[in-house]
Structures are given as structure tokens and as C-alpha cells.
Image (cartoon, coloured by chain):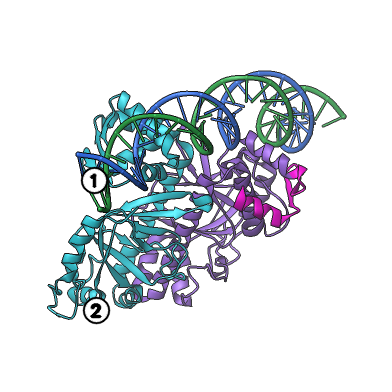
Chain colours: A cyan, B purple, C blue, D green
Amino acid sequence: MAGNSRDESIMKKVEDKDCTICNDYSKKQNCCNTSCFVDDELNIFKNLNDEELNLIVEKEQQIKYKTGETIIKQNTASTYVICMKDGFAKIFMEGEKGKSLIIKIIGKGNFITGGGLFNGNVHHFTVSAITPVTCCLIDSGKLTQLFTNNSQFAVELLRTHTRQNNFLLSRMVGLTQKYMPGRVADTLLYLKNEIYKSNRFITTLSRQELADMSNMTKESLVRILQQFKESNLIKTHASEIEILDEPALKHVSING
Amino acid sequence: MAGNSRDESIMKKVEDKDCTICNDYSKKQNCCNTSCFVDDELNIFKNLNDEELNLIVEKEQQIKYKTGETIIKQNTASTYVICMKDGFAKIFMEGEKGKSLIIKIIGKGNFITGGGLFNGNVHHFTVSAITPVTCCLIDSGKLTQLFTNNSQFAVELLRTHTRQNNFLLSRMVGLTQKYMPGRVADTLLYLKNEIYKSNRFITTLSRQELADMSNMTKESLVRILQQFKESNLIKTHASEIEILDEPALKHVSING
DNA sequence: CCTTTAAATTGACAAAGATCAATACTTTAG
DNA sequence: CTAAAGTATTGATCTTTGTCAATTTAAAGG
């Protein structure tokens, strides 16, 4: 969780440059711009025209967070929709007794709208950076303006929310009905397929965080990883994890 | 789960009448009509004008289900939004190994849109009647039409979805981070405050179903109820449950 | 390179919760 | 009213998972 001074110094360097987009020398950070939005199926802004896109990013700056910094704090209100431009963050809920439950990891191109859009704007989760993060904060008031003229945009937002809903439902069943090995298998497959997109990856997630994703203690998580290693399902060296036998992990996920 | 023949006979009688709304004697069931929608804050149709409301209910009939009948089956596609007109239903997920997790109970005035609205229309949960149910099935294609002209309606739908999202998040934390007494307390408080709206209620939910709401076995649920009775938090006679000490139950919910 | 601190791992033990089996109620069907 | 079937309750026992303490490994700062 502690700040990382090497990352920090690199960031400072970047921040010291003037805005490369608008060339306003009074600005020490890049502005947001339409390139902030990855051009994929999940982009809620994909149906907007240039004029609409510009309305959204107008006057917004990119914000940078260091590893461990809180981007959104649970139970506080904010009127931002966040678009991740670079880096990874964890979305998690802080329960009583200091326990955390990590709902998902977000990366480049992902949006965070879940909180209380049109609904009091209170966020029911905390978002914090697990690597240095660059993101755009878009005032959600601007979204409302778009609704009037562009119903396709509303459909897109609704689609995002039903998708999120279904994700939460399947996660809920997984967390409540599977034994520990099944839940750890799910976490590993999620990281491989959704986040790092590689069989072998170096993660900045600690064992405690992997445990928070799998709803168990760090000790239990370590023991399950150990079992997986002994069965040759995975290989690990400190923060590097390699999936050796995905079919077997899937089998554990379903039957474990 | 088995059908209830007394309920059935009553329903048959109702079904044999002609439509009391449109007086079309060829119809053996009531049509849907604008009175299907309860006039409260959660009504997603509250901002529609008469013309729009009529578009929605036009040609739709009320459908009746018997206790135990399946209204929506998990992993099937349907293009309906369901509006509950009478009775109660449970929304639950069927996991592997035959285990069920009841997400919530719905009653008069509630809508079911969660599934895959604008998103493939596949429902990720099963809905089944826990009492005789009357509901309207509204073709979701009609909703799309409304978007073009009424952006306020889109906002309303989004609001429903963010609310559902936040509900799922808090339920997820409750189910994963609380001990059994806390989870049972949550279930009882939910039934009292959200469903039956009375300290004393007779429920058609079996102990198994109460357990499915609390993520535990029926035996464990019974034991916790027994403890609550011994501590004078509740009183039970078969299917009747009475909350005697709500503050204490809330205390168990938070600290249990 | 060494010191200090944090993170990861391991083992022994305790607690929470599930399973299994037996018994007691309730409800339904005749 | 009574038998049969389903549901609820209880106790004994086993499994899963968490807790605590000790040890090892890795990382950060000088």
C-alpha cells in the first residue's frame, strides 16, 4: 500500500510538462481528450459524435494517482464518472471489522459509473490505485445533457449497468457457494483472462488482496496456491504467477 | 414447492370471468392497464404521459401463476419486463450442486428488468411465485420506443439499475462477511421492513427458503432462529414470525 | 551491502458451519 | 378422522475455514 518513490519520480517528470494537447502552458497536466476513450464494444461513449465527445472532455484534466491512493471513497458523494486512461485500480467494499471484499479490477478504457448515477451520487464502494493511475473525471451532469438528444447513449449506459448487474450476480454465487479452491481458481482465471490477458503475469496485488478477491484469509489463500503448485496447475515466483493448466483450473472452479 | 389446489380453484374462478377492463368477452383474463403500476417513487413509468402508458400496456394481458410456478427461468432469453400486480415471487440464482441463493423477494408494484435489457435478454436468475401471482409482461421492445422521446424515462430506468446494483453490493458484503446470526437477522429485518411491513407476519417461505436467503443450511437457520427465540428477539409459531426486539436484531446484524 | 521493515509462508489449534440420522410436527388426501 | 408425505427440529459428528504465533523471504533506504 505504501507509496513507491520510483514511480513517483517518474510521474513528477511527466507532470512537469505542459499540456501536450491544448498547449496551454499554465497547465501542468494533460487535458482529457477524446483519445481517452478506448475504441471497443464496452465504451459507453462509442455512439457519440465529435461535438458530443468534446462536450464531455471539455475543460476536464487528466488526474494522476499513486499506487495505494484512494480515487473514490465509499459512502462519499461525487458527481464524476471516471474513465481509466492508464494503470489498474481495485474496486472494493469495506465491511465492518476492517474486512475488504474486492469486487473487480479495472484498467485502461474501463468506466466507473456504478455508484449512484442519478441516484444521490453516493458511491457504495471504494476505488484505489494498485499501480500508478491516470484517469479522466467527467462531470456526470454532462451526461444528463446528452440524454435529451441521444437516446442511443442512454441505451449504452443501461447496457453497462445490466452487464455490471449480471457480473455481480455471478460473483455472488461464486463467493457464497464454492469452496476455497474454487474461489481461488476463479480469481486466477479472472486475472489471466480479464486483466493481464496472459498465462504469465506479474501482479501488484498482494496475497492479502488476492485473498480479498477470493473472500478468505491470506493464510488460506497461500495454502491453496501451494496446493495448486503441488498439482502443477500454476507456478509462482513472488509476484509472478503463471497458469500452467487452465482446463484443470476451470474444472476446480466448477466442481471445487 | 408443490401446487396448492385451494389456491388453484380460486384462480380458475377468476380466470373464467371476462375482462373487466376492456369488456372483450373473448378474453378470459384481465388486460393490463395503467392501474397495474403502483404510484410510488420506484415506479419506472411514473414520468410517462397517458399516451405513453397506453402504448406500454396495449394488447398485453395479465398473467397468473400458481405458487411454485416458474415465471422466468435462469439462462433463458425473454424480451419481457415484468410488473408485479399481486402476490410475491422470489428472485434466486441456481448454482452448481443444486444450491439456490435467493437474491430478493418482489411484490406488488415491483419491476423485473435486471436480466439482460438491451444486452442479449438472457436472464441470469430464476423468478418463481411463492404465492399466487398476477403480473403484466411488457415487451421490452416497447421501452426502446419510449427512449427516443422521453429521456426522463431513461434516467428512471438507470436509477432502478444503480439502485439494484447497490443492493447487490451490500448484500454481497453481508453474505460474505457476517456470521450466521448476522445474516439471519438481516433476512428477518428485510422481511419485516421491505416485504411484509409488519412486526408480525405469516410467510409462505419455508425454512429452506429462509436459509437460501441467508446463505446457510436449513438446519443452521433453525438453530439460529431457536437462539433468537431463547433471547426473546423473536417469537415463532410454524409459519408465523414476530419480531419482538428490532433494535437488538439490528445490533446482531451489525456486530454478528 | 547491510539494516530495517513489510510481506509471505508454515504449523498447531480453535471455531464456524455442514452433514447425517433420528424424531416430531404439519399438512394433505383419502 | 387418520394415514401418508412433506417439513421442521434436534443432537452427534465431521469438514472447512479462520486465528494465532513462529519463521522465512523479499523489499526499501541508507
Which residue is under mark 2? A59
Residue B238: within the magenta? yes
> Relative to B132, is B48 above or below?
below
Q: Position of residue B177 (x, y in %)?
A: 52, 46
Amino acid under disc 2: Lys
Compared to residue A186, the image places residue B37 above or below, namely below
Secondary structure at badge 2 equals loop
Q: Nearer the viewer, residue B108 or A147?
A: A147
Measure how far apart labels 2 and 1 are at the Cα level: 32 Å
Q: Residue at x 41, y 45 (%)?
A: A212
Pinpoint the chain carrying mark 2: A
Q: Which mark is residue A94?
A: none
Q: Is residue B58 at all visible to an observer of this figure?
A: no
Residue B144 spot, x, y in % from top left = 35, 66
The answer to which of B202 and A229 lies nearer the viewer is: A229
Mark 1 surroundings: few (<14), some (14-19) or many (≥20) residues within 10 A: some
Q: Is residue B197 left or right of residue A199?
A: right
In the rendered image, residue A204, in percent from the top left (x then y), is placed at 28, 47
Q: Is residue B36 visible?
A: yes
* Looking at the image, residue A86 lies above or below residue A166: below
Q: Amino acid at mark 1?
A: Tyr
Are callouts 2 and 1 both on one chain? yes
Residue A196, numbered label = 1
Considering the numbered disc 1 on the image, is that residue within a helix, a strand or a loop? helix
- If the image is split into quadrants, where does the C terminus of chain A sit? top left
Within-10-Å neighbours for mark 2: few <14, some 14–19, many 20+ = few
Q: Which residues are magenta?
A: B229-256
Percent x, y of residue B224: 67, 40
Q: Which quarter of the picture shows residue B238?
A: top right
| Residue A57 falls inside the magenta stretch | no
